[in-house]
Image: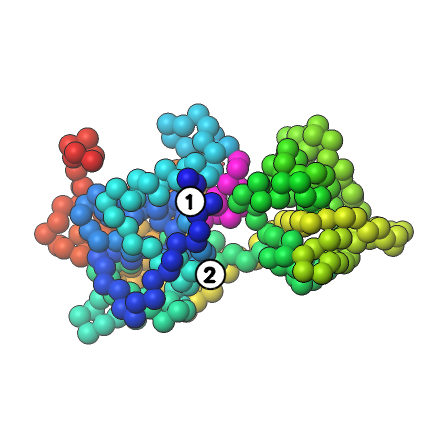
Amino acid sequence: MSVLNDEPVAAEDAAVVETDILIIGAGPSGLYGAYCAGFRGLRVAVMDVLPQRGGQISAMYPEKPIFDIAGFASVRGRDLVDSLVAQAEAHGTRYLLGHRAVALDYDGDGLPVVRSDRGTAVRAGAVVITGGVGTFTPRPLPAGEDFLGRGQVYFVPDPAAHAGHDVVVVGGGDSAFDWAALLAPVARSVRLVHRTARFRAHRASVAKVQALGIDMLTDSEVSGLYGAAHLEEVEIRHRTTKDTTRLPAQTVVAALGFLADLGPLREWGLTLQARRIAVDTRMATNLPRVFAAGDITDYPGKVRLISVGFGEAATAVNNAATVIDPEAALFPGHSTEKEN
Ligand SMILES: Cc1cc2nc3c(=O)[nH]c(=O)nc-3n(C[C@H](O)[C@H](O)[C@H](O)COP(=O)(O)OP(=O)(O)OC[C@H]3O[C@@H](n4cnc5c(N)ncnc54)[C@H](O)[C@@H]3O)c2cc1C
């Protein structure tokens, strides 16, 4: 079963968690870092503010095929996340999902202690920050959020949940077009509403939606949501004529983009450049025992791709291992030399 369709993994609320490596961020970089730590026999905990694993992939494009993962001609976002989770599971990984890392201190032995907004303190031999673009929150629908969870959604992790619905997708970017195309086969009707006639989405995504015959209402916006216990109707207003129309809708997908914010990480004393964490060639930050990998890092020549995050996570975790145990070798050994 896909991790995206699972019930949210129960978050731990233990007051204190002890681990060798704490990874902040369960995106692709963090999940691969968890594997690397487990492979070395280190205890690893992964904290993420979101209830699901997979970072940007799970939140924004779970159904999109990805073409630039080494060794895969094409892999669906959701399937890549499932494989990363399974790979990390092989050596045991402890998850603290729904926990936002808010503070970093050091204990009397000089070990980092990260506190979450739920009061959990994680004491670790080293911390690897794989926080991507920070915490991202969906831009709200201007018409209001009264029907959030009662018809209004930001993500479509499970298209079957909207089977037989009249769906209105709001937005003009890739996510809006992807969700529209994804829902077309299961929904009774799909309409796409966008405030202008220009779309940010890739031309191929627009062409796909057009080919599916999805109704596109441009120069328009959602001006009202109506219903009782559940959403029943959406009001659409034309931005020039101001004419309004009410359409039946049991689902409205607000795909208006995200607000990304490094949030509390900005206050930790990390050296930042261009709102990212500066790292050296070991992926070490300026703070003792704190490393970083993936989209959140910056250095000259940085390329922000999943494949680069994988490499950086391996570098960060293996260098962290030598800080936790100065006797440990940097090179972890070849996986082919191990039984699993
Ligand atoms: C539409 C789209 C398509 C893309 N297509 C491709 C592609 O084809 N190929 C490619 O290589 N890349 C692609 N990317 C980029 C790719 O998704 C990113 O490079 C990748 O997700 C970065 O992984 P990451 O693990 O570093 O960070 P993220 O995936 O951003 O994960 C970071 C995680 O950290 C968590 N977090 C942040 N701050 C905190 C905190 N304080 N406490 C707890 N948790 C925190 C976040 O909730 C998040 O889950 C695409 C991106 C988008 C948006």
The answer to which image quadrant residue 45 occupies is bottom left
Residue 86 in sight in this render: yes
The answer to which image quadrant residue 9 occupies is bottom left
Q: Is mark 2 within 8 Å of ligand 1?
A: yes
| Secondary element type, mark 1 | loop
Which segment is the magenta one?
54-64
Give residue 77's position: percent from left, percent from top: 47, 38
User: Disc count in the image?
Assistant: 2
Give residue 326's position: percent from left, percent from top: 13, 54
| Relative height, residue 51 to residue 90 (above, below) | below
Q: Does the residue labelled 1 lie within 8 Å of ligand 1?
A: no
Q: Is residue 50 left or right of residue 158?
A: left
Q: Name the residue under label 1.
A: 3
Residue at the image position 51 percent from the left and 48 percent from the top: 59
Give residue 194's position: percent from left, percent from top: 74, 46
Which comes before the other along the chain, label 2 or label 1? Answer: 1
